[in-house]
Image (cartoon, rainbow, N blue to C red):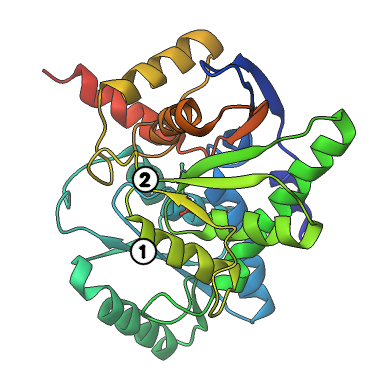
């Protein structure tokens, strides 16, 4: 690992927040404090992709995400800091002219942004890669092929390592977590955690709270990132009961969760990922958490989305 990348990924603090309504001790792993571009899980994931690109001899990073993508922002910032050219494909059917802080930060790095419709992602990836090759680059598309498949092993590395941190923390402090919760989207984070846990023989339940996908689709993606083939190992819990109708949608419970977390602890959550997942975790534990004592919530970052949220709330 490069020295700068090591610095970015120093083990993140684990903070005790008190007791949840169900009586459980709640510990928050502050991956929002990863030392780069506002932190977040995409920091670890961007570093894992960059390492993979370097191993494969690539010299132009190609990323993909929505206009508000934390991944695009982090990848662009990381590449910029290392003087590596970077190109962002941005899916923008709705919200093409929506200004988000993530988008502004990404634009500030000078990374070229190519807009495309959601139905045209594969053809756009193919075209962008072909053009880059013609210009003499060895482009690297971080998800793998134009359909976004094939690079699961690189992605899972990020949270496979993070799981080891969590395990080390438990060993050092003598805490025994029964559950680890986090916001789950593409499955990169959860797939990595699950693999790390299997390797270490960990016993915590890893529970991904879906931010968008239904259970079947979400769990299948986690299995793919965990490298599973065929049989279901039964250790993937992708909970889709708290999606509030879909990606980016939220309700009063989520708003109250965000407000309380800021006012009680000075920690920013956002309505799309961490606020939704935290509120979902609390509800899940109220229902199924009898006898549970110590749980962890991984704060996966997304800080710029908190400011987008504040901005929107100020609008009449
Ligand atoms: C991307 C993201 C997630 C979801 O992570 P996946 O690896 O895609 O499941 C959770 N929280 C934040 C803030 C994110 O940006």
Neighbour tally class for label 1: few under 14, some 14-19, many 20 plus, Cα within 10 Å: few
| Rendered residue at 72%/55% (across/down) | 197
From this viewpoint, which residue is outermost toward the front?
290
Answer with left or right where residue 119 lies relative to residue 231. Answer: left
Name the residue at 30% across, 83% down. 127
Q: Residue furthest top?
A: 263
Locate residue 34 relative to residue 100 in the image: left or right: right
CB atoms at circles 1 and 2 under 8 Å apart? no
Q: Residue at x 83, y 42 (%)?
A: 168
Of residues 210 and 247, the one drawn nearer to the viewer in this rendering = 210
Which residue carries the number 2 mark?
211
Which of the two discs, 1 and 2, sits closer to the camera? Answer: 1
Residue sitting nearer the eye, 114 or 34: 34
If the image is split into quadrants, where does the C terminus sit?
Answer: top left
Q: Does dot 1 land on a helix, a strand or a loop?
A: helix
Q: Position of residue 35 (x, y in %)?
A: 65, 39
151, above or below 94, in the image? below
Residue named by callout 1: 217
Residue at image location 79% in from the left, 44% down from the top:
167
Q: Residues within 10 Å of mark 2 (few under 14, many from 20)?
A: many
Q: Is mark 2 within 8 Å of ligand 1?
A: yes
């Amino acid at each position: 690992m490069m020295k700068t990348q090591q610095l970015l990924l120093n083990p993140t603090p684990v903070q005790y927040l008190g007791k949840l309504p169900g009586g459980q001790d709640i510990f928050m792993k502050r991956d929002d404090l990863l030392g780069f571009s506002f932190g977040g899980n995409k920091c670890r994931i961007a570093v894992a992709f960059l390492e993979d690109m370097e191993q494969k001899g690539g010299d132009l990073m190609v990323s993909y995400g929505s206009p508000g993508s934390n991944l695009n922002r982090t990848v662009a910032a990381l590449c910029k800091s290392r003087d590596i050219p970077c190109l962002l494909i941005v899916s923008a059917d709705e919200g093409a002219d929506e200004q988000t802080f993530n988008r502004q930060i990404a634009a500030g790095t000078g990374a070229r942004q190519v807009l495309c419709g959601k139905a045209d992602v594969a053809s756009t990836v193919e075209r962008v890669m072909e053009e880059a090759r013609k210009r003499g680059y060895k482009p690297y598309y971080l998800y793998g092929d134009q359909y976004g498949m094939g690079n699961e092993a690189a992605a899972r590395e990020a949270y496979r390592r993070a799981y080891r941190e969590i395990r080390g923390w438990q060993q050092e402090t003598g805490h025994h977590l029964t559950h680890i919760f986090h916001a789950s989207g593409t499955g990169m984070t959860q797939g990595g955690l699950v693999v790390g846990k299997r390797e270490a023989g960990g016993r915590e339940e890893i529970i991904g709270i879906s931010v968008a996908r239904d259970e079947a689709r979400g769990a299948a993606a986690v299995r793919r990132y965990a490298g599973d083939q065929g049989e279901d190992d039964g250790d993937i819990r992708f909970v889709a009961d708290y999606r509030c109708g879909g990606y980016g949608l939220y309700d009063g419970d989520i708003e109250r969760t965000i407000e309380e977390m800021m006012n009680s602890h000075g920690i920013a959550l956002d309505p799309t990922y961490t606020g939704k997942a935290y509120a979902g975790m609390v509800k899940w534990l109220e229902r199924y958490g009898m006898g549970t004592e110590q749980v962890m919530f991984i704060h996966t970052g997304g800080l710029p989305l908190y400011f987008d949220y504040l901005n929107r709330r100020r609008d009449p």
